[in-house]
């Protein structure tokens, strides 16, 4: 806005929400009013292509989808206007809360203020309709509402255990129903291997990757494992993986002739990225789980000189933090999964003997002290979320290979042993899918 020297006028929506009712049709009274008003205004509007630039010039009678994913946008209004001229702006990517829009009224008043005032909108999901009233009032918002409700991602009701080792490498899988029931073996697809890891991506799908021999296999939202995809990143075994950011994943740490701390991000399309320089103590035989809905945590493992209990948090942008002092019994060869929508649990492993104790992870990523073991102590099992808010530990080695499972309730309580179904094995991986 030319000559911005006056007071700053921050203009935001009134906070009324346009919201579908339980039948998918009815609107709240405020929302219904907004919808009707918007329908009337939009009837004569000519909608333009998506605007992505840092500046744009608006024309009366047009509607603009303003995408601020990469930058804020300053919008210059027409230098002259006639009574009744209308322009509509809509937050294309629900990102105005991060990168907002600034309105330059170009010499005309805006809500009766002259153009020395700053006019900005910084609310995600907003639609702004402005109409020119007269020289005194100038441009006046007729709609400035944010739809706060967004599509809810599908819940991950099912799980899958895959690959592993007994006397040799295996490629079969076992599906887990939304009731926590493990199915018999499904004939393997992909290279038989052990020491891989798995996590969710894209909200409703999964990915197995790395291991020996190294390769990647995507899992559809029906639990079908796809054929091999060429591995990206440093090949390694005994690593861990979890989801982050709601729809992406991360593989981290492991062993490749020595312990490493490198990570590889997974996009929401299941594409594994090249190596990211490691942060935290290099180690193998650790575990990882999502927590807080959109963050992750790596924990425990063997650094080559000792067994550790330290952890590394993962932000919702996939950034791994430095070491956090360990809580709970140091051990390796454990597993982890989420439960209760936003919490996690580490369980089982080896601290010099096979153990079954667990450690809960709060929705703030804080690891709790040991919970007395329930179920048979074992090493290198796998674990996954199922039923949207519950978890399951399965398989492993107790001195012999086992297929026993232990269910985790939505409050983090581990159940007693459930008789194993499927081929007994260890060094496998697991993840959830819809």
Image (cartoon, helix red, strand yellow):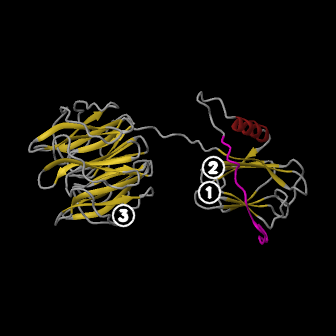
* Residue 374 in view: yes
Considering depth in this image, is 191 or 297 the residue closer to the camera?
Answer: 297
* Picture coordinates of residue 375, whole percent (x, y): 18, 40
Q: Is residue 135 left or right of residue 42?
A: right
Residue 107 drawn above or below residue 399: below
Residue 202 in the image: x percent, y percent?
43, 45
In the figure, residue 391 lies in which quadrant? top left
Give the quarter of the image for residue 309: bottom left
The answer for how far apart the CA atoms under marks 3 and 2 are is 31 Å
Distance from disc 2 to disc 1, alpha carbons, whole Å, reads: 8 Å
Say which of 132 and 341 sits in front. Answer: 341
Residue under numbered circle 3? 276
Residue position for label 1: 68
Residue at position x 63%, y 48% in the image: 125
- In the rendered structure, the answer to whether residue 20 lies left or right of residue 136 reads left
Q: The N terminus is located in which quarter?
A: bottom right
């Amino acid at each position: 806005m030319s000559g911005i020297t006056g007071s700053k006028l921050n203009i935001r929506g009134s906070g009324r929400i346009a919201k579908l009712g339980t039948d998918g049709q009815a609107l709240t009274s405020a929302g219904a009013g907004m919808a009707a008003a918007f329908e009337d205004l939009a009837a004569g509007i000519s909608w333009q292509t998506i605007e992505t630039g840092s500046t744009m010039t608006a024309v009366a009678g047009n509607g603009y989808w303003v995408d601020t994913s990469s930058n804020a946008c300053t919008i210059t209004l027409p230098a002259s206007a006639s009574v009744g001229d209308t322009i509509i702006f809509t937050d294309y990517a629900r990102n105005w809360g991060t990168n907002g829009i600034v309105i330059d009224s170009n010499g005309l008043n805006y809500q009766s203020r002259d153009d020395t005032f700053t006019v900005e909108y910084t609310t995600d999901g907003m639609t702004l309709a402005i109409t020119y009233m007269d020289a005194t009032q100038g441009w006046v918002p007729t709609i400035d509402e944010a739809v706060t409700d967004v599509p809810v991602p599908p819940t991950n009701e099912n799980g899958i255990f895959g690959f592993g080792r007994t006397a040799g490498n295996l490629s079969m899988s076992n599906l887990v129903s939304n009731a926590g029931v493990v199915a018999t073996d499904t004939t393997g697809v992909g290279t038989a291997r052990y020491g891989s890891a798995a996590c969710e991506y894209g909200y409703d799908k999964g990915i197995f990757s790395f291991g020996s021999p190294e390769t990647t296999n995507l899992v559809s939202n029906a639990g079908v494992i796809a054929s091999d995809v060429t591995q990206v990143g440093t090949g390694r075994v005994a690593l861990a993986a979890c989801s982050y950011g709601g729809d992406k994943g991360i593989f981290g740490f492991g062993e490749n002739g020595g312990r490493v701390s490198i990570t590889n991000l997974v996009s929401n399309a299941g594409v594994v990225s090249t190596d990211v320089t490691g942060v935290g103590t290099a180690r193998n035989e650790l575990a990882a789980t999502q927590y807080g809905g959109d963050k992750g945590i790596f924990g425990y493992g063997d650094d080559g000189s000792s067994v550790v209990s330290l952890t590394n948090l993962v932000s919702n942008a996939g950034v791994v933090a430095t070491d956090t002092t360990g809580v709970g019994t140091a051990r390796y060869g454990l597993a982890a999964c989420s439960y209760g929508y936003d919490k996690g649990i580490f369980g089982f492993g080896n601290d010099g003997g096979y153990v079954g104790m667990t450690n809960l992870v709060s929705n703030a990523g804080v690891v709790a002290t040991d919970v007395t073991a329930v179920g048979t102590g074992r090493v290198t099992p796998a674990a996954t979320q199922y039923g949207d808010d519950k978890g399951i530990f399965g398989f492993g080695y107790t001195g012999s290979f086992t297929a026993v499972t232990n269910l985790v309730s939505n409050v983090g309580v581990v159940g007693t042993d459930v008789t194993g179904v499927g081929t007994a094995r260890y060094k496998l991986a697991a993840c959830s899918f819809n």
